[in-house]
Amino acid sequence: MMAQYLALKQQAGDCLLFYRMGDFFELFFDDAKIAAQVLDIALTSRGEHGGAPIPMCGVPVHSAESYLARLIKAGCRVAIAEQVETPEEAKKRGGSKALVARDIVRFVTAGTLTEEALLEPRRANVLAAVCEVRGLIGIAACDISTGRMELEECEPAAMGAALARLGASEIVASEDWADAPFDAVRRPGRGFDSNAGEARLKDLHGVSTLEGFGAFTRPMLAAANGLVDYLDHVGRGRLPLLLPPVARTAGGHMAMDEATRASLEILVSTGGTRKGSLFEAIDRCVTGAGARLLAEDLSAPLTAAPAIRARLELVSWLHDDPLLRGDLRAILKAAPDIGRALGRVVAGRGSPRDLGQLRDGLSEAWRLREVLGARAQRPALAEALLPALGGHGALIDLYVRALVPAPPTERAQGGFIAEGYDAALDELRRAAGNSRRAIAALEAKYRDETGVSALKIRHNGVLGYFIEVPARHADKLMLPDSGFTHRQTMAGAVRFNALALHEEASRIAEAGGHALVAEEAHFEELVAAAFRARKGIAATAAALARIDVACGQAERAAEGGWTLPHVVAEPVLDIAGGRHPVVEAALAARGERFVANDCRLAPEDRLWLVGGPNMGGKSTFLRQNALIVLLAQAGGFVPAEAATIGMVDRLFSRVGASDNLARGRSTFMVEMVETAAILAQASERSFVILDEVGRGTSTYDGLALAWAVVEAVHEVNRCRCLFATHYHELARLAESCDALSLHHVRAREWKGDLVLLHELAEGPADKSYGLAVARLAGVPAPVVKRAKAVLDKLEKGRASTGGLAAGLGDLPLFAAAIEAVEEKVDALRARLNGLDIDALSPREALDLLYELKAQANG
Ligand code: ADP
């Protein structure tokens, strides 16, 4: 047995091997140690190998799914080795001692799950393959639980942002690529071949050219091949549902890097959960598929105005018609997740229940179409979705006739094909039913004959049907001519068989066996019908999800009094009465009111410096505006009274070092790396929020950096920007930067206490209130008092020297300073280039060197 195990383990590689033995999956050696620790189950041992006992542990087959779920969550991958013949077949093949043949039937990995129990209903499960082809990155991503597949290409520097957007639960990359994402599963490099990828996609979708699906580049096709190759490997040759690939074009979506996503807490909050995220605050979808699509929308807001307007128009229509919205949501709520049911069915892991879900989901889609179709003047997007909602009449009809109302998840026991669908099957069931009734009649007859009123006919898995009497009445039945044969003696009862009972029981077994075979054949036909209709069903699933998202957005907007944003081309941002959906919800839960604030950025006033005390609401203000932009471009209403949003191509959000807990590098280093990325990438169409940049270092360094960053953003990037800071000194930038204006969050001291008004006002912050905030936070009174004394001293010093920023106003502006530096370098270069070195004497050369050095020093 060990030889067989070790051979399978070799195939399983770094996956844990679940080795089927009877009713258990057993794990051995290191696999057992890992599993025992993750699952918190007993580690035992058996036999020995190489002189030491073999560690082992096991999980029961019937509850294997929940153990698998925990292992996958802990980051493990699992290979399942099943018995692929029965013990009888093994004996026939190789004699009484023959080992049952086993084979790995599938790999279970985080990115290739389809089981309902292992997937989160409201979260997409993405598998991504990444590769590099001639300096460009190809990414292929799919969600095999629904079959969606997407290909894209990007520069190496943008790979991190693209993967962050996808949020893949598993990434695959070539084993000979040094710069692959560190947590990728490594696969042989030959799997990432673009020609093979093209051929495979054509073959998969039965087309002679991929042009109909989009324009795919070499890196995209290479990644696609890596992806399909991996799926082929984990499914042991059986591919899951894969829909035609979609090419994601650069520029169709708002760019956001990983740091921006994290700091805006779009899908998960800094705590790593959905709680406290933007998604949680706005998700009102009634289906899992809707929630998954909403998450995708928020991860990739659009930059194409017509597409945004189409979504907004649909949301607006549903917003204005609460009755229609209510009707649609009621139907959606009743619709099962047909995308995922289809995924399981096509992957060969479907159950009768999945077919029932397809039937019910497609019927609900049909109803939805009727309701929508009955409305006059539908928005264009509704009109476009309408055809996808119907068109499955024949399939629904087939399933309605073929399946019982609530089909089981297990098909081994049959019972899922409806009566009246197959006359022969009905006949078999009738025969079994008759025999069951005959057996019931036999019980009465045997009681009569024996005079034992306590006689019973019973059934169990080992004996089948048998007659049971209490021990004290057994003698009568033991007599040789009684017509009963003894089978088993228990503590208080004795069990018998009888000819008539045996005959009826055999009839039941035979009819039951035939019925199971017939049901199984029907199941295969019904699966094949779904397989043929897979593209249409997937389109229906997508249409349902889109309608759910729009209804949910409309519902959320109605609930919160949100507004329809106007998306325009000019680089403006005009938000009246804006709110932060997450902070507002948190305050509402405590019975507190959120103070709405305006934000008005335009080309001539595009950089706002926001000052004011800590806890005054600066971060909240910055983020709410970024979130409003994001929500609008994702095609939804926004939490404001009115909003005009100039399309944003890239969104950046950065928080100062001390807000952002350690990530390996020093926090200040992280802050500077991120700031560098903004300065390198932000354009006039971008929107940037910078929160307390420069805080992670000494006061002088910090102020100097913040100063230079603001100037650069103003002069070079020229993007719309909100910059929160507690350096009062930055206010002086308003004198030299004409598109910069000063703002602050208001606070008031009242009877010695600080009152934070959370209200944005024009002008610089008047003082810093740091000590008042400290008092508010509970710093002991003597400490605050001492701090006050120190502060007085410092301020006196400041008055005499002109303060931290003394003289900064005389500095040339950022851009001017750069030009000056460059000029000097060029003068030197010009002189050097003009030299004829061979014509110089040693003395002249030395003099020249002195001269050049003097010139360099300016
Ligand atoms: P800062 O960045 O100025 O230190 P924050 O934006 O972190 O301040 O806000 C601190 C707290 O103040 C928030 O957690 C919230 O409870 C409250 N707050 C912020 N903005 C508002 C607002 N507009 N209305 C009501 N409360 C607010």
Image: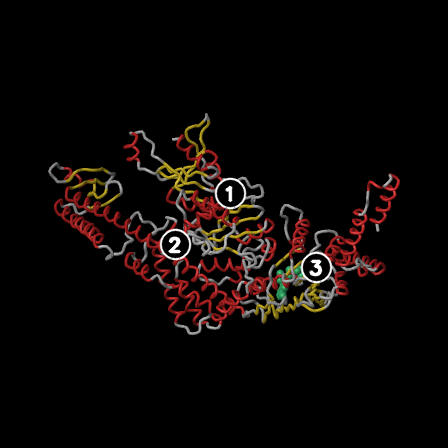
Q: Residue at x 70, y 64 (%)?
A: 754
Q: Residue furthest front?
A: 839
In the rendered structure, find residue 716 and report the number of the disc placed on it: 3
Separation of residues labelled 3 and 2 (CA atoms): 52 Å
- Compared across the picture, whether 462 is left or right of 198 comes to left
- Crowding near pointer 1: few (<14 within 10 Å), some, many (20+)? some
Q: Are marks 3 and 2 in contact (CB under 8 Å)?
A: no
Can residue 111 be seen at all in this image of the molecule?
Answer: yes
Q: Are marks 1 and 3 in contact (CB under 8 Å)?
A: no
Separation of residues labelled 1 and 2 (CA atoms): 27 Å
Residue 750: x and y, percent?
71, 68
Residue 527: x and y, percent?
33, 52
Question: Secondary structure beneath disc 3?
Answer: helix
Q: Does the beta carbon of the residue at mark 2 sit less than 8 Å from ligand 1? A: no
Separation of residues labelled 1 and 3 (CA atoms): 41 Å
In the rendered structure, find residue 342 and report the number of the disc placed on it: 2
Residue 63: x and y, percent?
39, 45
Q: Residue at x 41, y 54 (%)?
A: 340
Residue type, mark 2 in image: Leu
Can residue 615 be seen at all in this image of the molecule?
Answer: no
Q: Which residue is mark 1?
A: 185
Residue type, mark 1 in image: Val
Q: Does the beta carbon of the residue at mark 1 sit less than 8 Å from ligand 1? A: no
